Amino acid sequence: MSKQTKQPPLNAGRRTLIKAALAAGALSALGGLKPLWAAAKKKVTMGFIYVGSRDDYGYNQAHYEGKSALAKLDWVKAVDQENVPETIDVQKVMESMINLDGAQVIFPTSFGYFDPHILKIAPKYPKVMFLHCGGLWDASKHPKNVGSYFGYIDEPVYVAGVVAGHMSKTGKLGFIAAMAIPQVLRNINSFTLGARSVNPKITTTVVFTGGWALPVKEAEAANTLIDQGVDVLTCHVDSPKVVVETAEKRGIYSCGYHTDNSMLAPKGFLTGSQWNWGKVYQDYAEMISAGTKIPNLVRGGFKEGIVKSSPYGKAVGDKARKQADEVRGKFMNGSMVVYKGPLKDNTGRSVIAAGKEHPQTDIWLESMDWLVEGVVGSTKG
Amino acid sequence: MSDEWSAIAGVLIAVLGGAIRVGTPFLFVSLGECLTERSGRINLGLEGTLVMGAMTGYGVSYLSGSAWLGVLAAGGAGVMLGWLHALLCQQRRVNDIAVGIALMIFGTGLAFFLGKPLIQPSAPRLPALSLGAWSDNPAVRAALEINALFLIGALLAVALWWFFRYTRWGLYVRTVGESADAARALGLDVDRVRMLSTMAGGFLAGVGGSFLSLYYPGSWSEGLSSGQGLMAVALVIFARWNPIHCFFASLLFGGAAALGPALQSVGVTWGYYLFNAAPYVLTLLIMIATSSSTRVLAGMPGQLSSGK
């Protein structure tokens, strides 16, 4: 549907109404002539690169949805390419977006694009900004036209853990994870801590599949966890589709990841943890258009609007909703600290001493290499 | 103690269930490859055929509303790729392994290209037969949720064995595979026999692909196969070109793939990278154990270019 034919909503402001009327007029008389105030914004061209497919219900789709949110800003031109491997291919794609499309900013969204690919191309194009999702940028080592952005996704994961803690009858949760890297371990720990804040006897069994996209292994992990009595499943892999669908097929609950997965499990879906890249990308677009300096590091959670929870599924009871909403409120006002002492890992070692707190922004959390008490699993294969 | 026993039982049930669930695509691809190789050609392109079959099966099931029609269409796509392989290979001075690699890339690429709009929609899946209804243990019941394609594959393994051994057509295939010259002397059309064998092999591999997308894990995505088509080719060598052995080898590979997740789910937390790699380690061990620069493998068709 083209923009011009869209009916303005009833509560639309005067500006929107005038814009729609003008656009309708322009459509009949002048073709694509822009309303005057659109010219006030400087045009921005942004390039997005994904490692997988745009509609995988997962990591790549989350970025694609973020890019699609830019469509409503008519002064932004967003180009993208999917299925770009973490090889010299990504360098070629970056250069073609810069030279052919005139991109002023590039978002190579996959972890493995950073080193050596971005680091090699960035010095060649000092006027172009390279913003990498994942957080590897270091001011002392890396070029000034490179930066990173990332979100505290473990906040909605903690909230999902609270909901799972309320809904589980067997007290056994399952977590299907790709690899034992800090980001993944932090999600497993937050999920478990959230659930144990409801019921301290709950355990989370982890299965590491060894890869980001191994559908057969993910299905196998889901089935064998369910056989062992797990009644809520969640995951951290590129596409949560197989895990959520298998849980639904076997009649247990599931929590989604990356995007809204509720339509994959109409009965058993509880909630999920989603990225809100649309907001991040719009903010960047505004900054570039206005000519302000782009910060090299952007981080944030619920409060900054970078992450959000999926809407609750039908199965979620009032008690669970209430407590989850409360916890989310505490994240929003900054009073929530997930990682505080005394905290032991699952080998009995003390990892955070009593009285010590590590708030979300603490960089120490980004080097996590332990699993919290209550997790069945090991960080070393 | 009882905890340990239930854990061991849990792993065994998971490996058994996994052997059947994960092993079925291996079974179809390996039976197809077995037939093709018995006629004297190697079709390495079956990885591409598997992926193409998965995409076609899912697409046709989605459009027609019938999962079984999807299975047939997947077989049809496999026939087309098999035909292409045979057609290219019967040209002069064309190497079947090179053609196979080209078709592997072609099949996968074409499936990814055509499959773009199929990642999100939900197609009708194949139903399961609940053979575990007698048990009140949910794990046993889940392991014995068996798809009809597995039973068809098992019967097919026996049928193929009987075909090679007791039928005239089976003898033709074997003769062409052992010695093309002898076959020509008998008045057989070598190219034609090989073309039919490769097409039939492609059909089976395509059906194996539809099992992936229509039953387990049961959706179309680009990472669906993760090399199963290639592993099945190694499996045929392990099975010494015997269809019955292919059946057991497929179960072994399927069970190996289920081992990693099963051990972790009962709380065995060490060595999961090793257990996860079990099918690949197994493939490698087989290749090492069976390779020799001086002798030809027992049961190997004489015309295979890998044996020359």
Image (tube, rainbow, N blue to C red):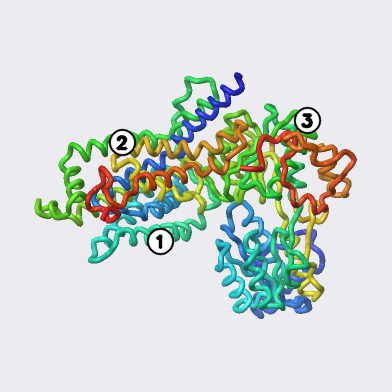
Q: Amino acid at mark 2?
A: Ile
Give neighbour class at mark 2: few <14, some 14-19, many 20+ (Cα, 10 Å): many
- Point out the residue furthest to the front here: B294
The circle on residue B106 is 1
Task: Please identify the quadrant where the N terminus of chain A is shown.
Answer: bottom right
Q: Residue at x 62, y 48 (%)?
A: A237
State the residue position of label 3. A200
Inspect this view and state whether residue B63 appears.
no
Inspect this view and state whether residue A317 appears.
yes
- Tell me the distance, in whole angstroms, between the alpha carbons under discs 1 and 3: 53 Å
Q: Residue at x 47, y 20 (%)?
A: B134
- Tell me the distance, in whole angstroms, between the alpha carbons under discs 2 and 1: 31 Å
Mark 3 — on which chain does it sit? Answer: A
Q: Earlier in the sequence, mark 2 or mark 1?
A: 1
Disc 1 is placed on an element classified as helix
Q: Position of residue A51 (x, y in %)?
A: 59, 60
In this rendering, position of residue A332 left or right of residue B80:
right
State the residue position of label 2. B244
The circle on residue A105 is none
Q: Position of residue B7 (x, y in %)?
A: 58, 26
Evaluate whether label 2 is on the same chain as label 1.
Answer: yes
Viewer-side residue, A345 vs A110 = A345
In this rendering, position of residue A340 left or right of residue A86:
right
Dot in front, 1 or 3: 3
Mark 1 — on which chain does it sit? Answer: B
Q: Amino acid at mark 1?
A: Phe
Dot in front, 2 or 1: 2
Give neighbour class at mark 1: few <14, some 14-19, many 20+ (Cα, 10 Å): some
Disc 2 is placed on an element classified as helix
In this rendering, position of residue A26 left or right of residue A338:
left
